[in-house]
Image (cartoon, rainbow, N blue to C red):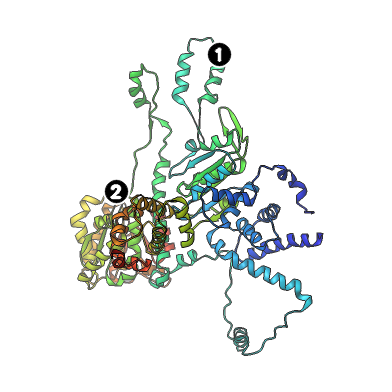
């Protein structure tokens, strides 16, 4: 086989530790992560091409989970940077441990060291508090860096992130530039609270994960809640599918489905009826208005789900 | 063998160009990535091949949705081209009656009715179109989308003003006096640093929203805007008026939006009739102005200025509001039309006391509002 680009890329093929596409699929399955091929393909390619993977989708569909699976696949550590509004470089990169520096100076006050020497000690590694980004760069092996909910951070931080993601080096004025020992495998997640910049998108592979359809959700429930009654599992999933068609403030994700299935199976319930749904709705809906809206239209929902409470109670 | 493979890579480059035509913004880098990706996958399987290209070339959800159709289109065309020599397919000729669409198009072209051809460009997006859409002409289908973008916009505007104050505050400036005071107990050793930042000089907002019939089409959107704004921007007071004035601040704070709208419109029905801006503003001046208005307050009035009430009362009230508040912004949905002149008597009277007179008839104009806050 001859490919014009093979010649310069052969070195990466020597690296036989890299998992294949099939490996990734089986690994996802082994970890109980049920999904379609697009997810494993994106994961696989982002690994092979060493590009960051940007995952978008509604809350509770398992975006963060993917990073964990990835870390397991590579048998490496997961370093997580949770983004929030107002997150800045000091919280993402590093900070000097000021108090410790001060105490140290106090302790060596009477020792015959020159000022330069003292200065060198207090600006050394042990006084540096590494935040996730610096941690990821200086990690002893190639880690998975999860930048969670990047849409929550400010635009300034996003552009700062862009710089780090392209250069993989961080400059600390007191000590100098730190270059990445291993370039981390990056996964970014976003709930689409705000649109991310085109520049950031460019650098990443893109993956969208939506709510699963009935079959997939049912599989997930069966997988994660092994002891569940088959009929109950089916009813729960059908009910959730209907629930998501309502206009709710916070549409429940797969995480809620699983919580609910766990709760109901722990109560040894083998089918849904109106009473049970009403009593346990708090597991699925986390908003007062949503709860009320669903309570109002519960009969209709049950009907659509295909559960006839009268028949069940007989 | 070799020629086939080079043709594959050439096809991929051409496919990228095809996607670019369809509005994907792909760089040469992306083409390289796509080609690189091929070496890791089994490209003989059509499915795997499609998945891989999809994973590499898409940048957003809408692109993901479009991709499969484009992929099929392109490779179908290509197959046709490859097999062209064999002439399996009979040549398609244009017969009237068989190919209705193209026949019609030809006919209308011949008769001189040049229909505008729909062109897809890279800048095409439903959001942009909706942003330009006049609120009064929003089809019910797009309502959700517009509401969503209004919510996002107001959140961003509010966040912007938040950040502005934080950045102007030099947080890294140590407060020496307090630091020394606090560290006295450590024998003057500066263990705890205290930083200072200028006191937040936050702007307050007072919103007066006309909910009379003439404003009906717009007020729903404006209230949605104010509602989302209020969720993040705390120092804001909202009033609704048509013939009389009512504070809806707590209503908006406590309820979810659809409920709040129901309550407001229920009250609005009982008021029905013309707008009496003068009386309403006068009521605001007598009941609330002393408490709410100061030099840090921006007053936003949302109204079209159609007034059936007392003009002198309007002038007096506007005078007071103008004198007390930092800025008066009058948002008029009609001002969005290019031919609009503020000729209505109410508008004429109020104009001298207004600092900013601006349109609010679509999402874009709401966005510009951020500039003045």
The quadrant the N terminus of chain A occupies is bottom right
Q: Position of residue A151 (x, y in %)?
A: 47, 50
Instruction: Answer yes or no: is residue A49 visible.
Output: no
* Picture residue at 21% right of the left edge, 50% below the top: B291
What residue did someone put label 2 on? Answer: B295
Q: Position of residue B231 (x, y in %)?
A: 33, 53
Q: Secondary structure at mark 2?
A: loop
* Picture residue at 44% right of the left edge, 62% below the top: B364
Q: Position of residue A97 (x, y in %)?
A: 47, 26
* Picture residue at 54% right of the left edge, 42% below the top: A145
Could you say which disc has been placed on residue A242 in the image? none
Residue contact between numbered discs 1 and 2, judged by CB atoms under 8 Å: no
Q: Secondary structure at mark 1?
A: loop
What distance separates the C-alpha of mark 1 from that of mark 2?
A: 57 Å
For residue A87, what is the image quadrant?
top left
Q: Is residue A89 left or right of residue B67?
A: left
For the residue pair A185 and A83, the one nearer the viewer reads as A185
For residue A15, what is the image quadrant?
top right
Neighbor class of circle 1 (other Cα within 10 Å; few <14, some 14-19, many 20+) is few
Q: Is residue B101 left or right of residue A284?
A: right
For the residue pair B297 and B367, the one nearer the viewer reads as B367
What residue did someone put label 1 on? Answer: A114
């Amino acid at each position: 086989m001859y490919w014009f680009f093979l010649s310069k890329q052969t070195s990466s093929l020597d690296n036989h530790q890299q998992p294949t596409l099939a490996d990734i699929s089986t690994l996802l399955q082994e970890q109980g992560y049920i999904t379609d091929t697009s997810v494993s393909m994106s994961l696989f390619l982002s690994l092979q091409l060493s590009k960051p993977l940007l995952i978008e989708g509604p809350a509770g569909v398992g975006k963060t989970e993917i990073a964990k699976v990835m870390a397991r696949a590579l048998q490496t550590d997961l370093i997580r940077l949770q983004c929030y509004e107002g997150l800045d470089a000091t919280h993402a990169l590093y900070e000097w441990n000021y108090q410790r520096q001060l105490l140290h100076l106090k302790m060596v006050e009477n020792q015959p060291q020159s000022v330069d020497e003292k200065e060198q000690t207090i600006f050394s590694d042990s006084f540096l508090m590494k935040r996730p980004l610096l941690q990821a760069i200086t990690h002893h092996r190639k880690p998975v860096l999860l930048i969670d909910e990047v849409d929550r951070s400010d635009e300034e931080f996003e552009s700062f992130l862009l710089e780090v993601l392209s250069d993989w080096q961080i400059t600390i004025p007191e000590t100098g530039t730190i270059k990445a020992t291993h370039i981390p495998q990056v996964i970014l997640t976003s709930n689409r609270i705000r649109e991310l910049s085109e520049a950031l998108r460019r650098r990443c592979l893109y993956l969208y994960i939506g709510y699963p359809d009935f079959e997939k959700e049912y599989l997930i429930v069966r997988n994660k809640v092994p002891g569940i009654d088959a009929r109950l599992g089916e009813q729960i999933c059908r009910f959730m599918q209907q629930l998501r068609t309502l206009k709710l403030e916070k549409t429940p994700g797969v995480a809620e489905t699983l919580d609910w299935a766990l709760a109901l199976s722990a109560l040894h319930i083998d089918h849904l009826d109106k009473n049970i749904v009403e009593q346990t709705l708090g597991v699925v809906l986390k908003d007062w208005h949503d709860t009320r809206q669903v309570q109002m239209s519960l009969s209709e929902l049950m009907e659509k789900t295909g559960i006839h409470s009268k028949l069940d109670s007989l | 063998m070799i020629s086939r493979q080079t043709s594959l890579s050439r096809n991929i480059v051409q496919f990228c160009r095809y996607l670019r035509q369809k509005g994907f913004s792909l760089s040469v880098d992306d083409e390289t990535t796509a080609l690189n990706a091929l070496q890791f996958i089994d490209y003989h399987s059509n499915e795997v091949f499609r998945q891989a290209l999809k994973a590499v070339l898409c940048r957003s959800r809408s692109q993901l949705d479009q991709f499969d159709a484009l992929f099929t289109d392109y490779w179908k065309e290509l197959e046709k081209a490859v097999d062209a020599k064999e002439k399996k397919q009979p040549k398609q000729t244009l017969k009237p009656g068989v190919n209705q669409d193209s026949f019609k198009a030809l006919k209308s072209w011949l008769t001189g009715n040049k229909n505008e051809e729909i062109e897809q460009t890279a800048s095409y997006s439903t959001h942009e179109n909706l942003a330009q859409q006049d609120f009064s002409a929003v089809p019910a289908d797009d309502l959700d989308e517009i509401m969503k973008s209004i919510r996002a916009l107001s959140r961003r505007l509010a966040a912007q003003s938040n950040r502005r104050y934080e950045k102007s505050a030099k947080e890294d400036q140590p407060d020496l006096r307090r630091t020394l005071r606090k560290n006295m107990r450590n024998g003057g050793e500066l263990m705890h640093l205290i930083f200072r930042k200028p006191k937040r000089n936050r702007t307050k907002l007072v919103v007066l929203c006309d909910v009379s019939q003439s404003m009906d089409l717009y007020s729903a959107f404006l209230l949605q805007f104010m509602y989302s704004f209020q969720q993040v921007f705390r120092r804001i007071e909202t009033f609704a008026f048509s013939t009389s004035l009512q504070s809806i601040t707590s209503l908006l704070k406590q309820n979810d939006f659809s409920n709040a709208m129901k309550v407001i419109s229920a009250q609005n029905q009982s008021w029905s009739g013309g707008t009496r801006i003068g009386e309403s503003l006068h009521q605001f001046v007598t009941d609330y102005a002393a408490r709410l208005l100061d030099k840090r307050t921006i007053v936003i009035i949302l109204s079209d200025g159609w007034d059936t009430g007392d003009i002198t009362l309007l002038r007096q009230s506007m005078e007071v509001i103008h004198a007390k508040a930092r800025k008066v912004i009058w948002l008029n949905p009609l001002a969005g039309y290019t031919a609009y002149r503020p000729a209505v008597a109410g508008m004429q009277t109020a104009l001298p006391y207004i600092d900013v007179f601006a349109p609010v008839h679509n999402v874009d104009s709401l966005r510009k509002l951020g500039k003045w806050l």
